[in-house]
Amino acid sequence: MHLALYAGNSLQRAELLSFAAPLITAFAERLTLIAPVSEAAMLDDAITHLQPEPAVQLRRWRQGDNFAAAILTAIAADRPDLLLIPALAPRATPLSWRRRQLEFDLLGSLPAPFLRVYGRITPIRRILVASAGGARSLRCVPLVSQLARAFQAEVTVLHVTSQEVVYFDGFTELPPSDEPTTSSLQQLAATLNAQGSPTRLQIVQGLVEETVLAECQHYDLLVIGSHQTEFDTTVPAGRWLRLLQRLSLQDVTRDLLDRSPIPVLVI
């Protein structure tokens, strides 16, 4: 697996490196370390902390004058299977607003799965997959299965039924009816079980975000969908829709990324 990691200055940088080390040991065949030009010295410091195996193909990526430029150019040049990224700005304060907006603009445009490390950092023993069901929910299976098997972790697939209208796992239409939803969730849990990842399905009723956040207290990693939708950017309407999506990211994904007390894997 090709892993990329932002090694520049950030909140909880030490926690990110600590969290990433066992992932790199378990999965990495290639490792790209990313930083802006002004923070290039931090790449060698990250290597000292991570101690990757000699067989891992290591690349130092030094581009751009800020974290967003460095990450986007690295991902565009050689898209990794998974990007490990820390929280890059503190929660809203007058001084951090611009950096925070830049961070969420970045997260809304990333074309690869990413794992954002922030909050309580513990070994991965219990994984919470929050899903609204549907065929797209199966996209999480390869990464979740690999993580669960590597760390002998238990998986819970959580579905929250609610009166709220939410667009989850990339849906552009209304969520499906209860029967198809239940069927797809059962398929997701069965597929993970079949791949050797002990998985249970939990369906509860409540407010989506508040219920997921409350459940996070009992887990080490939250997995959610990106909510990104493919628009036809060759036509003006598609370009505008994609632009609005990237500028706002005002949906369940952003709120969970902002408020989750544990690391979040976004597929």
Image (cartoon, grey):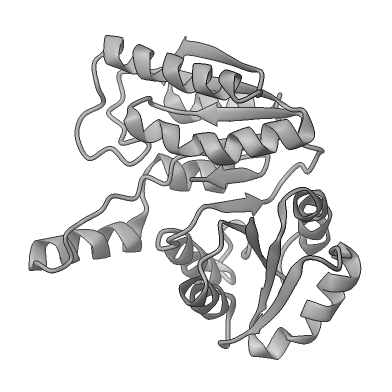
| Position of 238 relative to 258 (above/below) | below
Q: Residue at x 43, y 32 (%)?
A: 138
- Name the foreground residue: 1 vs 168: 1
Work out whether residue 169 can be spotted: yes
140 vs 229, left or right, is right
Horizontal and vertical percent position of residue 163: 30, 18
> Is 62 or 98 nearer to us in this picture?
62
The N terminus: image quadrant:
bottom right
Asked which quadrant contains residue 36, the reply is bottom right
Mark yes or no: residue 86 visible: no
| Residue at the image point whose x is 63% and y is 61% from the top | 2
Instruction: Give the residue displayed 59% in from the left and 76% down from the top.
Output: 67
Residue 39 at x, y percent in the picture: 72, 85
Q: Position of residue 161 (x, y in %)?
A: 38, 16
Q: Is residue 226 left or right of residue 74?
A: left
| Numbered circles on residues, count | 0
Q: Is residue 12 left or right of residue 74?
A: right
Looking at the image, is 198 positioned above or below residue 246?
above
Q: Nearer the viewer, residue 118 or 57?
A: 57
Q: Residue at x 34, y 57 (%)?
A: 248
Task: Give above or below for 151 relative to 65.
Answer: above
Q: Quadrant of residue 172?
A: top left
- Residue 146: image location, x then y, percent: 65, 38
Of all residues, the one furthest to the front in this rendering is 55
Q: Is residue 161 above or below residue 73?
A: above
